């Protein structure tokens, strides 16, 4: 029974560790992703500042130490090799919550959700792609928005 819940326990523990440890850091990665105990980030500051960041995280708890890899061309994360990620443009769709319009009948019609658009060379421009946030996946709402 314990093995079945091990990933959930690990995720809860690392989530709390992450919240506390990152609150101690004056500089944070531009992109920070974690899956259980594997972390990926894009650092846009200097390498000495990155080493200070890693040092802060490694001194937060005696049993958790991060190994790090620095590379501008390719890097492995979760058995996947990411390459040429410096050519990716990150744009934030929306930073603050949307205030409902007075003419809308429900909050659901106004809730777009936050998501990030990744625009990569060689792919269709963002305007030609349909982008939806899987966290707000209401198929009927999605159909109404994109297939009018």
Image: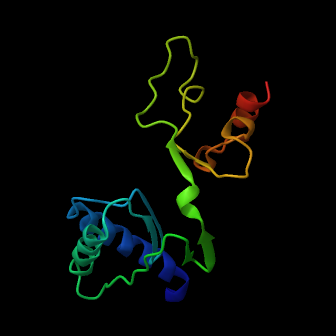
The colour scheme of the drawn protein is: rainbow
Decide which of 25, 122 is in the foreground and name it: 122
Decide which of 117, 47 is in the foreground and name it: 47
Furthest-top residue in this view: 103
In the image, 129: left or right of 134? right
**Position of 26 relative to 113 (above/below):** below
Residue 97 occupies quadrant: top left
Please report the residue visible at 53 percent of the width from the left and 39 percent of the height from the top: 113
In the image, 54: left or right of 30? left
**Position of 2 relative to 127 (above/below):** below
In the image, 7: left or right of 16? right
**Position of 129 relative to 106 (above/below):** below
Q: How many numbered discs, if any?
A: 0
Residue 25 occupies quadrant: bottom left
Decide which of 75, 110 is in the foreground and name it: 75
Please report the residue visible at 38 percent of the width from the left and 84 percent of the height from the top: 67
**Position of 35 relative to 58 (above/below):** above
Task: From the top left corner, tell me how far across and down residue 47 is, in percent.
Answer: 31, 70
Task: From the top left corner, tell me how far across and down residue 144 is, in percent.
Answer: 74, 28
Task: From the top left corner, tell me how far across and down residue 71 is, in percent.
Answer: 47, 74
Quarter occupied by the C terminus: top right
Please report the residue visible at 57 percent of the width from the left and 56 percent of the height from the top: 87
In the image, 11: left or right of 142? left
Please report the residue visible at 30 percent of the width from the left and 63 percent of the height from the top: 19
Residue 64 occupies quadrant: bottom left
């Amino acid at each position: 029974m314990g093995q079945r819940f091990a990933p959930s326990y690990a995720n809860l523990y690392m989530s709390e560790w992450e919240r506390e440890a990152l609150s101690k850091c004056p500089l944070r990665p531009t992109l920070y992703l974690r899956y259980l105990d594997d972390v990926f980030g894009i650092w846009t500051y200097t390498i000495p500042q990155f080493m200070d960041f890693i040092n802060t995280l490694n001194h937060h708890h005696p049993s958790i130490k991060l190994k790090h890899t620095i590379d501008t061309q390719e890097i492995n994360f979760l058995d996947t090799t990411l390459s040429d990620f410096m050519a990716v443009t990150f744009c934030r769709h929306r930073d603050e919550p949307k205030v409902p319009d007075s003419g809308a009948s429900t909050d659901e019609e106004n809730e777009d959700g936050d998501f990030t658009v990744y625009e990569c060379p060689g792919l269709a421009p963002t305007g030609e792609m349909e982008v939806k946030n899987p966290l707000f996946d209401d198929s009927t709402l999605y159909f109404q928005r994109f297939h009018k």
